[in-house]
Amino acid sequence: MKYRKLGRTDLEVSEIGFGCWAIGGTSYGPTDDEESLQALEAAWQGGVNFFDTADTYGHGHSENLLARFLKGKARNQFILSSKAGWDFYHGGSKKNFKPEYIRFACDETLKRLELDFIDLYQLHNPSLELILSGDPVSVLEDLKKQGKIRFIGISVHSEEEALAAMGDPRVDTLQLIFNLLDQRMLEKVFSEAKEKKIGIIAREPLACGLLTGKYKLGHRFVKTDHRNRWTEEKLALELEKISKIKNILSTERLSLSRAALEFVLDQEAVSTVIPGAKTVSQVEENLKSSNDPQLRIQESFQLKEIYQREEIFKRK
């Protein structure tokens, strides 16, 4: 496993992190806790030291699982990031970035994780208006002064939100979507992040599983899988994009999923990529992208070029 500096922080994070959304058990179909714990341990044995979760993943279940997994491990050997902003405590689930709620959510996360502090605490997809106001970051700044968190991050969806977040000097990291099917952040955002030494955490590097190559037209996701909302038209469009990507790659030499992860890691601004995994075999496949990269420079260039050139990649 190779390691990279997380922006201007003093944290050295594994290139391949562990995204803990899926193991929460409420968004990617059924899970088995023992299997999830085995996947976490396989990642740990493979050198992964960065684990990214959120309180809303399984309404605390992902954090509870992490606490079980991390018990007995030296605190300076792992880096834990979590997020707040989705209030599931008061009926339903809705965005809530009020100061009193963020403080409450942080305390609840610390209890579930059984930790004294969180290495990186992130606002979970706040609106552009909230980012520009700076108010939620002020709450995280207070939590930092209290020693409950070490560094401040923001998870975003759009370029505009990313650029606004980097305009706040208190923000250390950005978590954003970046993959072969969605390269919006590549130019403006990545260049500014490098200039300002903002750590980039790339999420959904496999495009919610599409870039594993295992889904075909007509696939039906179970009701407990958020991808159940995808229309047949969306799936057809994404599969058409993937066929163009495959034409560039020699998939006999490396799998589509490996190429997808290696493409993300080829970007200098990226500190770590956080694919999800529910099984040991998925973890082992993810680790190959750091341990034995095989994506060629020319292929990486062509994968950027096709995204910029082909109109189909602009359609959603």
Image (cartoon, helix red, strand yellow):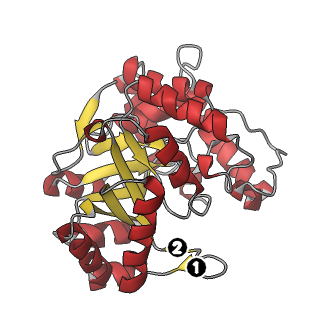
Q: What whole-number distance in Å separates the C-alpha atoms at marks 1 and 2? A: 5 Å
Q: Which residue is mark 2?
A: 86
SS at mark 2 in the image: strand
Circles 1 and 2, Cβ within 8 Å, touching? The answer is: yes
Is residue 94 in sight in this rendering?
yes
99 shown above or below 9: below
Is residue 243 in sight in this rendering?
no
Q: Is residue 7 left or right of residue 45?
A: left
Around disc 2, counting alpha carbons within 10 Å, would you say few (fewer than 14), some (14 to 19), or many (20 or more)?
A: many
Q: Residue at x 20, y 49 (%)?
A: 7
Q: Quadrant of residue 122?
A: bottom left
| Numbered circle sitting on residue 94 | 1
Around disc 1, counting alpha carbons within 10 Å, would you say few (fewer than 14), some (14 to 19), or many (20 or more)?
A: few
Q: Residue at x 51, y 54 (%)?
A: 63
Q: Position of residue 173 (x, y in %)?
A: 28, 57
Give whichever of 233, 222 is nearer the camera: 222
Q: Residue at x 62, y 43 (%)?
A: 241
Give whichever of 281, 160 is nearer the camera: 281
Q: Quadrant of residue 92?
A: bottom right
Q: Hey, what amino acid is under mark 2?
A: Trp
Q: Position of residue 180 (x, y in %)?
A: 49, 42
State the quadrant of the N terminus: top left
Q: Is residue 62 left or right of residue 274?
A: right
Looking at marks 1 and 2 on the same chain, the residue that comes earlier in the sequence is marked by 2
| Residue at the outermost top position | 253
State the quadrant of the C terminus: bottom right
Q: Position of residue 8 (x, y in %)?
A: 15, 51
Q: Position of residue 227 (x, y in %)?
A: 71, 55
Q: Hey, what amino acid is under mark 1?
A: Lys
